[in-house]
Image: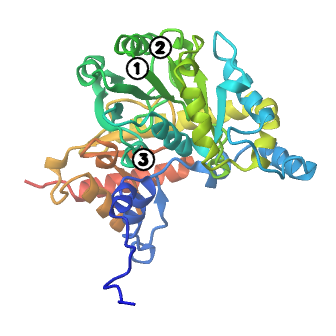
Amino acid sequence: MKKKPEWGFKENQELHAAAAFTIRNILEAIMGNIDESRTGKTMIHLGHGDPSVYPCFRTTTIVQDALIESIRSAKFNCYPDGVGIDVARRAIAKYLSRDLPYLLSSDDVFLTVGANHAIEVLLTVLARPGANILFPKPNYPIYEARARFSELEVRHYDLLPDQGWDVDLDGVKALADENTVAIVLINPGNPCGNVFSSEHMKKIAETARELEIMVIADEVYAHQVYGPKPFIPMGVFGDIAPVVTLGSLSKRWIVPGCRFGWIALTDPAGILQQTGIGACLKSCLTISADPPTIIQGAIPSIIENTSKSFFLNINKLLKEAADLFYEALKEIPLVTCPYKPEGSMFAMVKLNISAFDDIVDDTDFCMKLTKEEAMILFPGDAVGLKNWVRVSIGTEKKVLEDAIARLKEFCIRHTKTN
């Protein structure tokens, strides 16, 4: 037999390109600059939204007890249905219904391996040749990464920093056409730390109805608010336009490693079921991964038994961090935070690049900050805003104070001296 000149397989370059969008890959590249022995400083990681390593942000013992009981019961060692086990779906439906003017059933809920998996499933379901989807700018990077593997054309609408990161609705209308399928809305905001008002959300729903598209409401940080505006789920306006809600256990319960999320059809008119979206979600999940059944079995207890005081304490800690960071930033040259965080655990900070002596852009800023101060921030270019940085404020007070001091020293050191 004639020998083949080379192997029949080779690396998937498209996969590399998609992975370049992910937070993990970007942070890995930045962290490669850390040399704690050279700087004499321990690493401060404000590049991702995972405060679980800090004692003040540890999850409730309710989560631990529920997981132990789920294991010991021996009821949840089986394969689950693709959409999730019924007791967990009912618990999530009941949980979401608390904030809605209508009741969800378990048939409206589809369980996923965290919110990233939910995004993957939804983009798969909506993809078809010629279709397009509207993403915010700035955006959560995994949307961009997953879209590269779908047939959806991506179009970006602006969030307006001088208007509290509200949606540029005129821009949305200009972008959409007859092939637009959905608009993605992240509230509370990642990466901006904003919270949409009820009035603004109603306008978004009315715009979606006018354009005849669905709203994908990414509410991973639901109820994690600490400013003047309360959290209002987009599903409240589901009678105006159909809404698909994404949620997760990760952030509110501070357990990102549990990898448990959901997709909910918050659509009282039933448009998403009538158009086959519900059936398509079920089909997609049938051939996809499932959250561990052990975790699914623990969900009813976690949802029902976690005290309000736990959530109030988490929000109190985040508010204190937001207040500290926002005020301290005013004393640091060449950086500005145009909007004080009110929700999630992030702030977007603008860099005055032209006033730095030897900083080329936001990525260069983050690389040099890591090398000189052993401190990690996330470059804004990766979320769609060049020459900004995203800062996670979900950390202990003393760590945040140290981070602010390091940031100030770095900015002063690199300021142009005319």
Residue in the foreground of this view, choosing between 119 and 185:
119
Q: Do the residues labelled 2 and 1 touch (CB within 8 Å)?
A: yes
Q: Earlier in the sequence, mark 3 or mark 2?
A: 3
Q: Which residue is drawn at 47% across and 49% down?
A: 401
Residue 128: name its quadrant. Answer: top left
Q: Which of marks 3 and 1 is nearer the N terminus?
A: 3
Residue hosting label 2: 241
Residue in the foreground of this view, choosing between 416 and 79:
79
Q: Decide: is 232 above or below 369.
A: above
Instruction: Tell me, for residue 146, which label it has, or none.
Output: 3
Q: Decide: is 263 above or below 33.
A: above
Residue 177 coordinates in the image, percent (x, y): 27, 22
Residue in the foreground of this view, choosing between 174 and 203:
174
Badge 2 local density, few (<14 within 10 Å), some, or many (20+)?
many
Q: In which quarter of the image is the N terminus?
A: bottom left
Residue 191: name its quadrant. Answer: top left
Dot 2 amino acid type: Ala
